Image: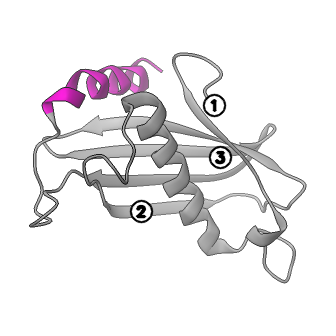
Amino acid sequence: MSPDKGRFVHRRRIVWGDTDAAGIVYTPRIAHFVVEAVEAWFRERLSVEWLAGPRTPFVSLGCRFISPMTPADTIDVEVSLVRAGRSALDFALVARAESRLCWTAETTCVFVDGDTFKSRPIPTNLLVAVEAERSIAVAG
């Protein structure tokens, strides 16, 4: 899904089931697109499956809508890790249909203990990959 080694891009076709009665993407579906793209980033860049790997729920999500999407569109969602803290990862996402900007989003997910749901440090086996991803965003 990533066209080059630097940027991570998740491609998604808009389907009829994503739309509302007006024929454009139903607003809450965009939150789903964000989660889907970040999940793909974890899988492709960190080799982590969300269901089998460490728990990383979202603790914040903000979105700015720029232009509507229809089933005629395929969107490319660029995911950038912009900050890695002790236990949290902050992402910036930008979605485009061809050259048209559709939406931007910011989100934070936190590594948590599976039993207590309290934050825990990023697992040591992921730190090198996380730092490499963060440096891509800084360089870009």
**Residue linked to disc 3:** 95
Local secondary structure at mark 1: loop
How crowded pointer 3 is (Cα within 10 Å; few <14, some 14-19, many 20+) is rated as: many
**Residue linked to disc 2:** 61
Mark 1 or mark 3: whose residue is earlier in sequence: 1
Horizontal side, residue 60 vs residue 87: left or right = right
**Residue linked to disc 1:** 1
How crowded pointer 1 is (Cα within 10 Å; few <14, some 14-19, many 20+) is rated as: few
Local secondary structure at mark 3: strand
Residue sitting at x 42%, y 17%: 139
How crowded pointer 2 is (Cα within 10 Å; few <14, some 14-19, many 20+) is rated as: some
Reply yes or no: does residue 23 show up in magenta: no
Residue sitting at x 84%, y 83%: 21
Residue 23, percent from left and from top: 87, 74
Boundaries of the magenta span? 124-140
> Label 1 to label 3, Cα distance in Å?
14 Å
Say which amino acid is labelled 2: Leu
Mark 2 or mark 3: whose residue is earlier in sequence: 2
Name the mark nearer the viewer: 1 or 3. Answer: 1
Question: Magenta stretch: dominant SS?
Answer: helix
Say which amino acid is labelled 3: Ala
Local secondary structure at mark 2: strand
Residue 45, percent from left and from top: 43, 29
